[in-house]
Image (spheres, rainbow, N blue to C red):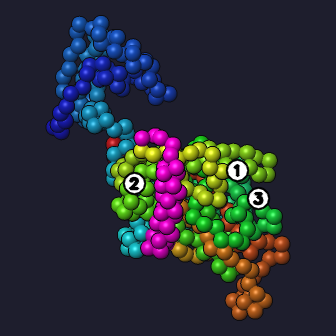
């Protein structure tokens, strides 16, 4: 019989009882509070325990007065480890791998997923994702923060009816913002956002003026009939680790000082303050570790930087600006830059709070280039047109845990 050893208080064990009296069979929610469980244990004089099996599963039977609960060994192991279900699989098995361009190309075996491998239905039908293929795609996304689906149909371009929505909804609910559930990135005159121009768009995180920016982003190339406009991505965790190794003092300044981001345009005003770097080590497991860096949306610096003691000094301010410059230099190091042209039908998925994204400037083709390349232009249609959407982290991690259990036949504990 499998063994597990450790110490648990009776109160904690009673609080975790999984029986139908303690976990409602329909709602799967607790029917008692932790305080009630502790009071019940304190009042009991006849608590008993025995090792046994229930439906072929080893575990522990606990007699709480007239109430008996069975604790499967998997639950006991989770209680002793301090990990909730899914934590070991998502945070440890799928622990993030930091990369530069060369290691990503060498090690990321599932960087590309073909739409035909992902789609279980017939061509032209709504996407019916194969669990195994979707799991591989999301594992690549979680581990490396970057993945591409090739061959995603481009014929449907509406916000309610498009292949991007079908792909995202195969994972879960879309994150809605004032841009909508899905949105278009096109070259627009007098644009309210630099993304909607043909200008160079530097490395950034989206929506840092929100208190909780979306964790994941998807961008689907519907049309790409221009010169330039290559997409490029950088693992900001890897760049930050380089800064930490070279200048730990500057790294620490970015951990303790905040930048305010704001959006004040087009009938909207949003603002929020974030530290650039998280307090915990970026190489350690931690689903919610994030880097907050988006120079185009920085508000005026009204918060004075502080030193390690919390004091506001001119030296601390100088150090903070030096740290910002050093971090940008690390991000701009060519070895971290993975650049490629997002071709029509390709959809890139990335961790918005880890993998910074950018785009080079572009221009329309000349008449000579159009003739030479055989480019087909549709009057009134943008020559570079991406459709995008966001997914919250919890949505992706929920799907990963469920797919792992479904495909591999085990609980992701």
Q: Residues within 10 Å of mark 2 (few under 14, many from 20)?
A: some
**Residues under labels 3 and 1: Cα distance?**
10 Å
The residue tagged with tag 3: helix, strand or loop? loop
Number of the label disc, if any, that sits on residue 209: none
Q: What segment is highlighted magenta in the picture?
A: 309-338
How far across and down, in percent of the image, does residue 197 sit? 73, 68
The residue located at (37%, 50%) in the rendering is 281
Q: Nearer the viewer, mark 1 or mark 2?
A: 2
In primary-sequence order, the first of circles 3 and 1 is 3
Residue pointed to by mark 3: 192
Above/below status of 36 relative to 279 = above
The residue located at (33%, 42%) in the rendering is 413
The residue lying toward the viewer, choosing from 72 and 268, is 268
Residue pointed to by mark 2: 249
Above/below status of 291 relative to 122 = above
**Residues under labels 1 and 2: Cα distance?**
31 Å
The residue located at (76%, 46%) in the rendering is 268
Instruction: Tell me if I can see residue 113 in this picture.
Output: no
How far across and down, in percent of the image, does residue 122 sit? 59, 65
**Residues under labels 3 and 2: Cα distance?**
37 Å
Tell whether position 102 is magenta.
no
């Amino acid at each position: 019989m499998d063994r597990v050893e450790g110490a648990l208080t009776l109160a904690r064990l009673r609080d975790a009882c999984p029986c139908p009296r303690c976990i409602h069979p329909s709602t799967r929610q607790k029917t008692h509070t932790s305080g009630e469980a502790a009071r019940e244990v304190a009042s009991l004089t006849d608590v008993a325990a025995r090792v046994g099996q229930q439906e072929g599963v080893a575990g522990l039977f606990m007699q709480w007065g007239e109430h008996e609960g069975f604790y499967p060994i998997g639950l006991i192991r989770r209680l002793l480890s301090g990990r909730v279900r899914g934590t070991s699989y998502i945070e440890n098995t799928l622990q993030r791998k930091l990369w530069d361009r060369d290691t990503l190309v060498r090690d990321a075996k599932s960087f590309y997923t073909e739409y035909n491998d992902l789609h279980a239905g017939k061509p032209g039908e709504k996407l019916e994702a194969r669990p195994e293929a979707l799991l591989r795609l999301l594992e690549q996304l979680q581990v490396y923060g970057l993945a591409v689906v090739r061959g995603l149909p481009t014929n449907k371009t509406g916000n309610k009816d498009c292949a991007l929505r079908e792909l995202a909804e195969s994972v879960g609910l879309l994150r809605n913002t004032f841009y909508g559930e899905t949105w278009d990135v096109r070259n627009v005159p007098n644009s309210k956002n630099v993304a909607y121009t043909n200008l160079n768009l530097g490395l950034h995180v989206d929506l840092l003026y929100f208190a909780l920016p979306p964790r994941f982003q998807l961008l689907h190339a519907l049309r790409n009939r221009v010169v330039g406009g290559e997409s490029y991505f950088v693992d900001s965790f890897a760049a930050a680790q380089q800064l930490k190794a070279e200048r730990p003092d500057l790294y620490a300044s970015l951990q303790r000082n905040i930048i305010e981001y704001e959006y004040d345009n087009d009938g909207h005003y949003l603002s929020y303050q974030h530290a650039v770097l998280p307090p915990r080590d970026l190489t350690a497991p931690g689903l919610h570790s994030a880097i907050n860096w988006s120079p185009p949306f920085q508000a005026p610096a009204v918060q004075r930087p502080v030193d390690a003691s919390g004091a506001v000094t001119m030296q601390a301010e100088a150090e903070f600006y030096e740290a910002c410059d050093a971090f940008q230099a690390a991000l701009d190091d060519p070895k971290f830059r993975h650049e490629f042209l997002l071709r029509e039908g390709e959809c890139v998925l990335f961790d918005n709070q880890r993998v910074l994204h950018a785009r080079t400037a572009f221009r329309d083709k000349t008449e000579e280039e159009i003739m030479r390349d055989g480019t087909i232009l549709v009057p009134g249609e943008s020559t570079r047109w991406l459709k995008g959407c966001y997914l919250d982290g919890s949505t992706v991690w929920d799907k990963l845990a469920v797919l792992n259990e479904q495909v591999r036949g085990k609980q992701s504990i």
